Amino acid sequence: MTKTLDVITIGRAGVDLYGAQVGGRLEDMGSFEKYIGGSPTNIACGTARLGLNSALISRVGDEHMGRFIREELARHGVDGRGVVTDPERLTALVILGIRDEERFPLIFYRENCADMALCEEDIDEAFVASARSVLVTGTHLSHPRTEAAVLKALAFARKHGARTALDIDYRPNLWGVAGHGEGESRYVASGQVTEKLQATLHLFDLIVGTEEEFHIAGGTTDTVAALRTVRAVTAATLVCKRGAKGAVAFEDAIPDNLDDGISGEGFPVEVFNVLGAGDGFFAGLLKGWLDGEDWPTALRYANACGAFAVSRHGCTPAYPSLEELNFFLKRGMMRPDLRNDAALEQMHWSTNRHGDWSEMRVFAFDHRMQLESMTGYTPSKGGAFKELCLQAALEVQKGRTGYGILCDDRIGRRALHTASGTGLWIGRPCEWPGSRPLTLEPSLGPDCGGLSEWARENVVKVLCFCHPDDDDSTWDRQLAEVRRLYVASRRNRLEFLLEVIPSKVASVTTDTTATLIRRFYAEGIYPDWWKLEPLDEPEAWARVCAAIEENDRHTRGIVVLGLDAPEDLLKASFEVAARFPLVKGFAVGRTIFGSVARSWFEGTIGDEEAVEEMAIRYSRLCAVWDGARARVREAAE
């Protein structure tokens, strides 16, 4: 059978609620960040980020947290066919935090949780047979029902020639040998647990654990003796994680000194958060193991991935992409607190974004000043009209990818909130309309703290009327506002779109927009998106694309704005812009809704007619863009 998967992981799937405040007790936490969690789930996501075809076998609840896990798996590219929805049980939760360098309190909410209902019927032989390797974690050996499922999967794996791996992942609390308040505990001696583990160790080709985890597997706190006990019942390669000392692998007999094992390059990073570091380590190890690398190389990958996890907040969010890992290994470690390495964090952010937005057809109705000036406008009617705009956008989208909206919160709040979860790309403006120098919407607050209330799928959009010839005072003031918003966007993990319109300030040349772009990059501002006015000359587009790519080759790209241009002029500008792959599409508004809005506010057309007309115009503009792009592709072929 063709092996379409590199690895299937089996076991826990839950939601981590991470205390956002660092340095306090869980009792004192005021807010939490929500991440996907559970060791096998973390490992599946970590390996997917490193380019492996990964899948998970587990169970989740038929509720919001279960759907969150499924959606996150899909965003990471993890195959979720083996994840069963349990109609009776809730998805597991973990509440955890960072107290200091040594204390990481956590509470497991796993009483009769969904993933512990995994059973033999959930294991499909053909699915397991499609994988090159199967990884299980120790928790699912702690209950007869889940143990039976694991053993069935392992039998299928061995039958169909898949490698098998075990992450001992010993949590005394999850084996019932420590109380609910002891979630942080990593070791409690238990003969029953040792006996259970030793009965299964012969089934694995690779076994990974900390020294404490090998102590429970070997039944002794003498690490060498424990490893020798494990070796007596399995021929697996044993990898022992030793914290700051790195990790060592043993393929054969266990030497008297752990230092005599096979080791890989380590990375002496600052310890910020050890939670999930072992899962990151295992993801890197699997990458090397399944790619056929030698153990020093595989351990180097593992140590690097573990170092990323130790230095960042969260588990899965901390793990590197393959591009990021290669960048780090090639460039080297510049500082021990990796989360404060600006170049590395930019690489981490830009190569781990979710969603395919390679095509962008955006209906922009974030306009405020233009609507407020129309005859018949009232705030309530403005909000109602924006809901009609959203209806038109959804009629054109029809559930397909590559479509989006720009919508504000002040007039269009109901439309903005309704759009959430529809699959539309959603941009949200932050500038006070028409302001120059740039002024931000007061609702954001003086520190842009209002962004903490935004839905994570919202993209922060700011329009800056600027020109390379601006005087220093104007430039400094506008730059300060853009930088403040950009930093706050990253802090809140929101993508950032920067729109610049120099033609409204002064005359432009072939170099004007490219010069502006370089200036923002020089100030450390790396927009995920650029929104630019149409450029008539191909050379101007070429210079713009060069300015972006020489600074950020992982940018999302460019969308072209409309400036209320008639369709025939937009068509001509699209023909030029579509020649450049970095231009992903358009974000146009008044060309679609302008005359419709005036008629609707005046009462000469109704809701249905307004929606129909805007949908026709939006659809026609999409066809114009798609046609321009198709002609470019045909010419290239």
Image: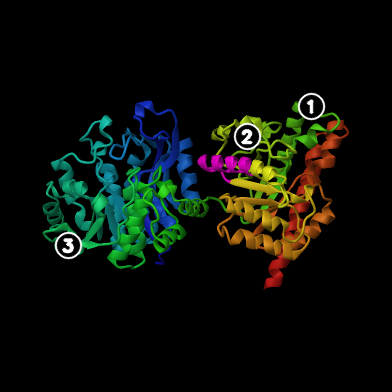
Is 32 located above or below residue 310 in the figure? above
Dot placed on the residue nearer the N-terminal end, 1 or 3: 3
Front-most of residues 98 and 405: 98
- CA–CA distance in space, label 1 to label 3: 78 Å
Q: Which residue is mark 3?
A: 260
| Magenta stretch: helix, strand or loop mostly | helix
Question: What residue is at 29 percent from the left and 37 percent from the top?
Answer: 103
**Residue 51, horizontal then vertical, whole percent:** 44, 60
In the image, taking residue 129 as reference, residue 202 lies left or right, namely left
Amino acid under label 3? Asp
Crowding near the residue tagged with mark 2, few <14, some 14–19, many ≥20 C-alpha atoms within 10 Å: few
Front-most of residues 511 and 429: 511
**Residue 143, horizontal then vertical, whole percent:** 25, 41
Which quadrant of the figure has residue 36?
top left
- CA–CA distance in space, label 1 to label 2: 20 Å
Is 88 located above or below residue 589 in the figure? above
In the image, taking residue 48 as reference, residue 526 lies left or right, namely right
Q: Which residues are magenta?
A: 479-495
Front-most of residues 164 and 222: 222
Q: Which residue is mark 2?
A: 417
Is 250 located above or below residue 634 in the figure? above
Q: How many marks?
A: 3
